[in-house]
Image (cartoon, rainbow, N blue to C red):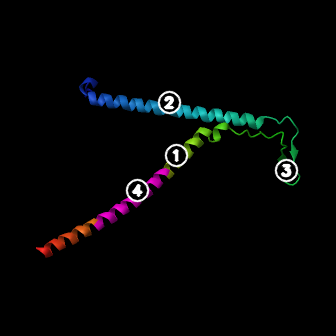
Amino acid sequence: MTTPPLAQFPGQQAQAARDVNTASLCRIGQETVQDIVLRTMEIFQLLRNMQVHSSPQRHPSTGCRKETEAQLIPYVEDDSSKPDDRMANQMRAASEERREVLEVNKKLKQKNQQLKMIMDQLRNLIWEINSMLVVRS
């Protein structure tokens, strides 16, 4: 049994190329992840094997090392973790704008209520006028 040439099945050829491409990408991704894991394990192994420059002090009851402040890594607050003044100003402006919109909506509802009352009064007045005209005729 002979295999038909790939040129006769262009749709299958494109699908096969896509499958090969997907398989290649998966393989490359797997190798990359394995490389990252391997390097991370090496780093942790090096850190585990490093000796502390000062003599470690052991806590008498637990046997664990007691670290001094000098041995700890100092925490430096990153400026990017604080909100920018610009961002705070934008938030304030947005809040102020929202407050203004709510106030305008409240005033608009009050005006709508007033207009509705006026329309009802006009409707009643027209009704009375029409009623009087019918009685006269």
Answer left or right for 100 relative to 3: right
Residue 123: x and y in percent read: 25, 67
The local secondary structure at tag 3 comes to loop
Q: Residues within 10 Å of mark 1 (few under 14, many from 20)?
A: few
Q: CA distance from mark 2 to mark 4?
A: 62 Å
> Residue 94, which numbered label?
1
* First in residue order: circle 2 vs circle 4: 2
**Relative to 21, does residue 136 appear above or below in the rendering?**
below
Q: Based on the displayed image, in which of its 4 quarters is residue 129 positioned? A: bottom left
**Position of the N terminus by quadrant:** top left
Q: CA distance from mark 3 to mark 4?
A: 73 Å
The local secondary structure at tag 4 comes to helix
> Residue 63, which numbered label?
3
Identify which amino acid the numbered label 1 is placed on. Answer: Ala
- Mark nearer the viewer, 1 or 3: 1
Q: Which residue is mark 2?
A: 28
Q: Is residue 101 magenta?
A: yes
Q: Is the residue under label 4 in contact with that under label 3 (CB below 8 Å)?
A: no
Q: CA distance from mark 2 to mark 3?
A: 46 Å
Q: CA distance from mark 1 to mark 3?
A: 56 Å
* Residue 84 appears anywhere in the view: no
Q: Which residue is mark 4?
A: 108
Identify which amino acid the numbered label 4 is placed on. Answer: Leu
User: The magenta stretch spans which residues?
Assistant: 100-121
